[in-house]
Image: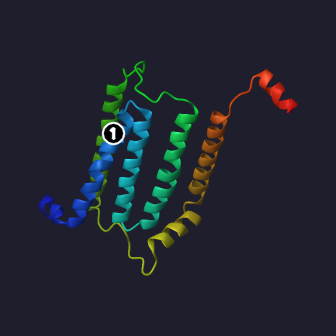
């Protein structure tokens, strides 16, 4: 498929309309000096990736992304920022000496990954049809079977990671009492 054939498809325009803002928002997440702005750019990047899942007819995954990541994780980030009284404005004392080497390393990883994907696709004769014919099965059904059968251990591991994040958030939010406050609380 040539570029002119690719760009003539309306679904590819929809892909570009979601992918370009997602990449820009992702770059702003890691380059923003304001932590709250970074969290809001993360919301935009996650919403655009949910749109890409809708384009792939994976509506269940898109809505899980919206509910879990945008609805819970980003809100948890914002609560964590506010509870720990992290500085919200611009930080002047942050060291950005490693910003450019990190950017070069990230571009290098991206270039190597892109090259490997193209090399494998060329060796295999192209990307081909990404999804096999599944008959009457739905994307949600296939995803559920994958969670229970093939991806059970990683699915449970993600649950433990979320549990650890919850315990860490509670630990950070808990106020340590001074001995005088503990004594006052014991009397009440």
Q: Residue furthest left?
A: 4
Q: Give whichever of 178, 129 is nearer the camera.
A: 178
* Left or right position of 67 against 101: right
* Left or right position of 97 against 16: right
Please tell me in which quadrant of the rendered image residue 187 appears.
top right
Query: Image height check: is 169 above or below 16?
Result: above
Please report the residue visible at 28 percent of the width from the left and 41 percent of the height from the top: 111
Q: Residue furthest bottom?
A: 136
Query: Image height check: is 27 above or below 137?
Result: above
Looking at the rendered structure, the number of numbered marks drawn on it comes to 1
Q: Position of residue 147 (x, y in %)?
A: 55, 63
Q: Give whichever of 113, 87 is nearer the camera.
A: 87
Query: Image height check: is 93 above or below 72?
Result: above
Please tell me in which quadrant of the rendered image residue 176 appears.
top right
Q: Residue furthest right?
A: 187
Query: Image height check: is 95 above or below 109?
Result: above
Picture quarter with the N terminus: bottom left
Q: Position of residue 158 (x, y in %)?
A: 57, 51
* Left or right position of 50 against 16: right
Q: Position of residue 146 (x, y in %)?
A: 53, 65
Using the rendered image of the protein, determine whether residue 52 is visible from the camera's viewpoint.
Answer: yes
* Left or right position of 151 against 119: right
Please report the residue visible at 25 percent of the width from the left and 55 percent of the height from the top: 17
Using the rendered image of the protein, determine whether residue 122 is visible from the camera's viewpoint.
Answer: no
Q: Position of residue 37 (x, y in %)?
A: 40, 37
Type of colouring: rainbow
Q: Which residue is mark 1?
A: 27
Q: Residue furthest front?
A: 188
Picture quarter with the C terminus: top right
Please report the residue visible at 51 percent of the width from the left and 40 percent of the height from the top: 78
Instruction: State the SS at label 1.
Output: helix
């Amino acid at each position: 498929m040539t570029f002119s054939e690719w760009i003539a498809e309306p679904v590819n325009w929809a892909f570009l309309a979601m992918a370009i803002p997602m990449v820009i928002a992702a770059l702003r997440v890691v380059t923003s000096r304001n932590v709250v702005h970074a969290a809001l750019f993360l919301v935009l990047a996650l919403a655009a990736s949910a749109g890409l899942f809708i384009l792939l007819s994976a509506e269940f995954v898109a809505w899980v992304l919206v509910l879990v990541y945008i609805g819970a994780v980003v809100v948890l980030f914002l609560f964590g920022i506010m509870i720990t009284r992290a500085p919200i404005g611009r930080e002047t004392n942050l060291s950005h000496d490693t910003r450019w080497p990190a950017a070069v390393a990230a571009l290098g990883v991206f270039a190597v990954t892109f090259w490997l994907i193209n090399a494998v696709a060329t060796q295999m004769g192209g990307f081909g049809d990404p999804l096999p014919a599944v008959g009457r099965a739905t994307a949600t059904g296939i995803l559920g079977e994958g969670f229970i059968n093939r991806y059970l251990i990683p699915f449970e591991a993600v649950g433990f990671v979320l549990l650890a994040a919850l315990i860490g958030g509670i630990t950070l939010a808990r106020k340590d009492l001074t001995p005088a406050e503990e004594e006052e609380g014991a009397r009440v």
